[in-house]
Amino acid sequence: MAGGRQAWCPRCDEVRTARPGAACPVCGRQLLRVPPARPGQPEPGLGDRAARRLRALLPLAGAVGAALLVLAVVGSAFVAGRLTRTTPAAPAAAPTSTAPGFGDDEGPETGRRDVNWQARAGRITVTLRSLTVGTGFSRLELHVDGVPRGRRVSALQRLRVRDADGRDLLARGELASIATAASRPNPAGGVDTEVVLDRPLDLPAVASVELGGLTVGSDAVDVLEGSLLDRELQRKARGTLDDGSWLIERSSCPGCKLRAECQDCHTLRVVGSAYRRGRMLIAVEALGRVQQTALNLSERRVVATGEGGAAELPAWIDGTGGSAVISVGADILAATRVGDPDDDRPMGFEVRVRAQAEQAIRGGWTMRQAGS
C-alpha cells in the first residue's frame, strides 16, 4: 500500500496512483507517503471535536483570555490521552475535475498537436503550446506571461474546449476549476504549466480553448518561536521517556510555563497557547484573506524543531478557516535539550507554518486556431 507508486492526499483523504510529492489531481494538495497501519490507535473523536470547538471560540479569546480559553476547551480531550489530527472535510474551492494523476505513469501517448495559440487579457498572456492525448488522458501544455515574479499557476478556472462549430469537446462542457499537474518558471520568462484531463480529446476537432481565470500561488512561510519550562519532564528526559504514559496521565503541572510568539510572521498571529499532557498548543489566526496566508489549505504543512534545529518534533496543524491550532509534542523536545536538566532554563523551539498562498486572476482568454 505504501509503495512508491501510491500516495495519500491529506485534503481528500484518499490514496492516489502517483508518487509521494506529486500534486493531487483532484485538489492540487501535495501527496504524502501512505501512512503505515497503527493497530490499536483509536479513531478520531473527542479530541477532534474539542479542536473544532476551540476554533469556533477563538473570536472570544480577547474577552476571556486566550490561554484560559484554550485550556478550558481542550482539557477534556487530554483526559482521554490525546488530541488527534483531523482532515478537512472539504477544500476551500474544490475542483470539478477527477483527472487521475499520471506524471510518469500517464501511459502511452497516441497523438500530439503543437498549436501555439495565444490570447491576452489585461496584463496576462496565455499561450496554448500543445495538446497531447494518450490511453485515457489528455494533456494541455500552456505558457503564461505577466504573472508576478515568484508565482506559479496552481489552477485553471472555467476551462472549455470547443470544435470549429462551437460544440463542447469536454464531457461536462465547462470545468469550473482544475488543478495544474505541473507549474514551473521558464528561464526566458513567464510560467510553463500543464493540466491533465481524464479522457482523450479528439485532437483534429479542437478549434479553441477558453479560460475564465487563473489561480496563482507562491510560498507563504511564517515562523513562530517559543519556550517551555517543565522541570519534571526535563529531569526525566534522560531516563523514562521510553515510556511516556506518565506524561499523558499527569493531571496538572502548576510550575510549567509555555511561551509562544511570532518571530517572523507576515500572514498570521498567535492568539493563545496552552500546555497539557505533554502537548504544546498554539492558537493562530490569519491576517487578511485565508487564501493568501500560511493557513491556506493548499500544500499547508507545519514543521517544529528543537533548539538549534537539531531535531524535528512531532507536530500537526488543524483548522479549515481563518484560525487553526498547532500541536507540538514536548517529549522529544526534552530528550534533545542540551545542558543541565536542573538549571531551570526553558526549552526553546521553533515552528514553521508553510502553505501556498493563492490569488485569483480574472480573465477571459480564448485561444483558437486561425480562421475559427
Image: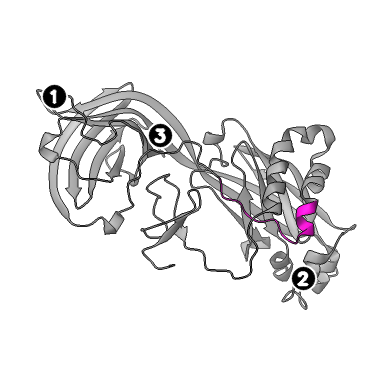
**Is residue 259 visible from the viewing direction of this image?**
yes
| Marked residue nearer the N-terminal end (2 or 1) | 1
Q: Is residue 339 left or right of residue 160?
A: right
Q: Quadrant of residue 331?
A: bottom right
Q: Amino acid at mark 2?
A: Ser
Name the foreground residue: 88 vs 222.
Answer: 88
> Looking at the picture, which amino acid does disc 1 mark?
Asp
- Left or right: 40, with 17 as reference point: right
Q: Position of residue 134 (x, y in %)?
A: 18, 51
> Can residue 148 be seen from the camera position used here?
no
- Image quadrant where one finds the C terminus: top left
Q: Classify 184 as above or below 61.
A: below
Residue position marked by numbered label 2 in the rendering: 245
Q: CA distance from mark 2 to mark 1?
A: 70 Å
Query: Which of labels 2 and 3 is toward the front?
Result: 2
Judge from the rendering whether residue 312 lies leftward or rightward of residue 155; answer left or right: right
Q: Residue at x 45, y 38 (%)?
A: 94
Q: Quadrant of the N terminus?
A: bottom left
Tell me which label, 1 or 3, sits earlier in the chain.
Answer: 1
Mark carried by residue 283:
none
Residue 192: % across, % down: 29, 41
Q: Secondary structure at mark 3?
A: strand
Q: Secondary structure at mark 2?
A: helix
Label located before the other in sequence (2 or 3):
3
Question: In the rendered image, which residue does mark 1 sit on?
Answer: 165
Image point 64% across, 52% down: which residue? 351
Q: Quadrant of residue 340?
A: bottom right
SS majority, magenta: loop
Magenta highlight range = 76-88
Which residue lies under the disc numbered 3?
A: 215
Could you give the CA–CA distance between mark 2 and mark 3, rounded to whole angstroms? 47 Å
Q: Are marks 2 and 1 in contact (CB under 8 Å)?
A: no
